[in-house]
Amino acid sequence: MFAFFLAGSLLAQETERTAIFEPDVKVPMRDGVQLAANIWRPKAEGRYPVILMRSPYGKMDENWGDAKRYTAAGYVMVVQDCRGRGKSAGEWAPFRYDAEDGFDTQEWVGQQPWCDGQIGTAGGSYLGWTQWASAARASKFLKAMVPIVPFDSAYDIGHAGGAFQLALLMGWGTAVGGVALSPEKMAESFRHLPLNTFGDQFEKKIPFLNDWVTHATYDDYWKQRSIESRYSEVTVPVLNIGGWFDIFSKTTIDLVDQVRATSRDRMVRRNQCVVIGPWGHGPGGRKTGEVDFGADAKLNVGDWQFKWFQYWLKGKDTGVEDWPAYYLFVMGENRWRGENEWPLKRTQFTSYFLHSSGKANSLKGDGSLNLTAPADEKADEFTYDGKSPVPTAGGNNLVGAPAGPFDQAKVEEREDVLVYSTSPLEQDVEVTGPVKMILHATSSALDTDFTAKLVDVYPDGKAFNLCDGIIRARYRKGMEKAVMLEPGKAAEFEIDLWVTSNVFKQGHRIRVEVSSSNFPRFDRNPNSGKPFGTDTELLVAKQTIFHDGAHPSQLVLPVIPR
């Protein structure tokens, strides 16, 4: 089924006399398409474990530092262009062929005379996806993985909470679709309507951008771009590395969590690990956004990866067996801590209730947050106008807006942002785990959005975002079926704010912001109730947030006893 040849062998060359470099080796897929790979091999004859990376971003050259390190340690490095990218043949259709192509490539690599039958996979972002895409129903040669800032379902990432992650998919999609946009042009393009023609607005059309909008529910299109929750079929040790402010923060933890819970292999269940720090999409540094998390935040990701492969592919004792399942950086007190499960068993899910006398609008309003359930209180109201959406100010971003914690002062000046804060804390409060908002609200629209953002307010008044989320009203009862609102009738909305780990220090305040937009991270809901992506105009919605005995809107925090 798989051919055995190295089309690039005649071009083989030495790399600093210790390695042989073979560029653009053609690897055949099951449908006959050939994908190009660069291969670095130790100069000495023999069979070695292989580190495989599959990328849509191009292959490294012969002097690549990681290749030198790994070949010197007795590994073969293989870096392959994804289908339709670089020197690889076939159609470039993001996410579509990576499961099959990953398996076929592993089978080919595993049967080469220089491979000892063991493959480890590596790489971040899309390269994290290419690893997880072939993790279920993987080749027998796959023995270990180190996905960095990974995900396993393009749909779950693209349609978070039912809203469309516009900046991520359209910003990244134009780049890999061959359209280079200046920041100004990108900002302008994000306002394009209707969204289902987004990919037609450029000189070079990008059809898959329109497809991502047209396929608004989890249909066959997206099932081909997901591992479809086959976590029980993952049978290799995995080290996931990510950041609290990364666009894939939640899934970095969820993937390992699911394998630990369901894999049919007991050893594999015990050897799923997560390292997650105070980083955005590029893990390892000490400063993200406007916050310096200190020297301890720095982490040599490459060394963690190397130790993982040395243990699982070469049997060397690198301390891996002593690593905790979850190695978390706790912001606020800025230190690392190992944990054995997620959420933590000692978590006390605690409700912080919204309060006001009907004027929580902006930081100047009277919104408050505490542990006492509300009784009879006047509701808060604001107007959501998609022509003037609340701007994205930090958070879990990749393109279109900076990632990380930023002072929310400008956002909190807006009348369409409701602000609820605790009094200054009398003692430290640790929040580590999944965060959610339960909101009771009405809208004048058939469909609209509600957003929530968790914020740490410092004694000097600076307010730094930690995590946030959104819910599209039509999907408040699940993504399987759209259920429109009855204008003016109260409904309950559960907003997933993803994950965090932060100690709100004594004297700080816990704050939540509530609104209806976070743009351009998420698309602007047109408030019409029409099929997604078809609107050419944006309607105004009148929003009402309740916090009374019958409608106790609340922020639910995973509080860790201290």
Image (cartoon, grey):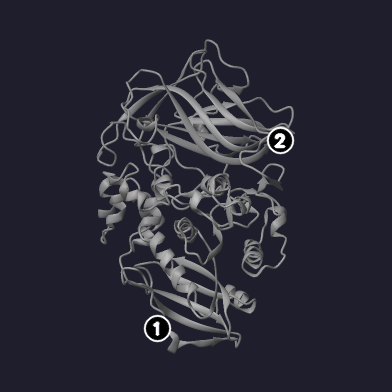
Percent of width and height locating residue 382: 42, 24
The residue singled out by tag 1 in the image is 7
Residue 142 point in image, percent of width and height: 52, 64
| Residue pictured at 52% horizontal, 33% vertical | 412
**Residue 97 sits above or below residue 329 on the image:** below
How much space separates mark 1 and mark 2, taking CA atoms? 61 Å
The relative height of residue 183 versus residue 473 in the rendered view (above or below) is below
Element marked by disc 2: loop
Residue 56 visible in rendering: no
Depth order, front residue of 234/504: 234
Q: Residue at x 25, y 54 (%)?
A: 200
Q: Residues within 10 Å of mark 2 (few under 14, many from 20)?
A: many
Q: Is residue 537 left or right of residue 385?
A: left
Q: Residue 141, percent across and down?
A: 51, 67
Q: Is residue 167 above or below residue 530?
A: below
Picture disc at residue 505: 2
Image quarter of the N terminus: bottom left
Q: Nearer the viewer, residue 327 or 236?
A: 236
- Residue type at numbered disc 2: Lys
Image quadrant in which you'd find residue 522: top left
Compared to residue 438, the image places residue 98 above or below, namely below
Q: Nearer the viewer, residue 383 or 254?
A: 254
Q: Position of residue 317 (x, y in %)?
A: 72, 65
Determine the residue positioned at 74% across, 27% down.
426
Q: Nearer the viewer, mark 1 or mark 2?
A: 1
Residue 359 visible (yes or no): yes
